[in-house]
Amino acid sequence: GAYEDGPTLQMGFGTETNSDATLRNNTVWGGNAAVYFRTWSTGTVTDNVLRGGPTYNRLVDKAYQGTPLTGYTWTGNHYYATSTSTVWWYNNGWRDLPTWQSSSYTGLANSGTAENLPGTATTYLRTNKYDGSRALLVIYNWQGTGTVSVSLSSFISAGAQYTIRNVYDIYGTPVLQGTYDGNPVSVPMTGKTPPPLSGHGWSATGPTSGPYFNAFIVTTP
């Protein structure tokens, strides 16, 4: 969904009951709810990081009131919100974390902990499995700073040339390029307007995710 107009991650669609949902080791940020579950009777939701959009910061929307949660394994998640924020939905209302995790919602007692946003960005740099001269850089810029410091040493050696491009503007001007000296580089987090989506007589332009989130392609000759 859009950054604030819908859920970032939706599990299930329609009114048919599903089973065995698995959501594990994900970072989900944005939307009017970070995660939206719809008619799942059983599921495993573990070791995820959840943060809603800046207006609502709603984390979990469990649709269809009365759907039992006894079949869920829901543990080890990190919720970036205060425990008193009413950002967890179940049974026709937004709840705070203690209420949501109470015995009346069996299966959620050890679902995770409410935490403050990290003071520094979370970054992932992954070399392309099939092209060693190319890597994906993902940055969660929790504090919304203008730049984020990133080490490229797991991908290239000091003295190598590098180019960093925003995935929304892959053929445009690089956001950063030069000769790597072995020290972290300062990556600009300015938002880029994504290419428009179109088809069947319909078109739309997606939201700009920067400075809070950006993905980049890093290349070296």
Image: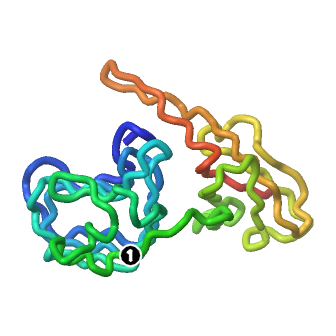
Residue shown at 59%/39% (left/top)? 168
Q: Mark 1 points at which residue?
A: 112
Residue 5 horizontal/vertical position (percent): 37, 37
Residue 212 horizontal/vertical position (percent): 60, 49
Residue 111 visible in the shown view: yes
Judge the density around disc 1: few (<14), some (14-19), many (≥20) Cα neighbours within 10 Å. many
Residue 41 vs 38, above or below: the answer is below
Q: Nearer the viewer, residue 132 or 91?
A: 91
Residue 123 visible in the shown view: no
| Quadrant that contains the N terminus | top left
Residue 53 horizontal/vertical position (percent): 46, 47
Quarter of the view holding residue 4: top left
Judge from the rendering whether residue 13 lies leftward or rightward of residue 173; answer left or right: left
Judge from the rendering whether residue 6 lies leftward or rightward of residue 15; answer left or right: right
**What colouring method underlies this structural image?**
rainbow
Q: Nearer the viewer, residue 165 or 39?
A: 39
Residue at disc 1, secondary structure = strand
Residue shown at 78%/51% (left/top)? 163
Judge from the rendering whether residue 7 lies leftward or rightward of residue 119; answer left or right: left
Residue shown at 50%/69% (left/top)? 115
Residue 41 vs 202, above or below: the answer is below
Label 1 sits on what residue type? Answer: Gly
Residue 159 horizontal/vertical position (percent): 92, 65
Quarter of the view holding residue 148: bottom right
Total marks drawn?
Answer: 1
Q: Which of 110 and 72 is in front in this view?
A: 110
Judge from the rendering whether residue 216 lies leftward or rightward of residue 91; answer left or right: right
Residue found at the far front of this picture: 84
Residue 161 vs 189, above or below: the answer is below
| Quadrant that contains the C terminus | bottom right
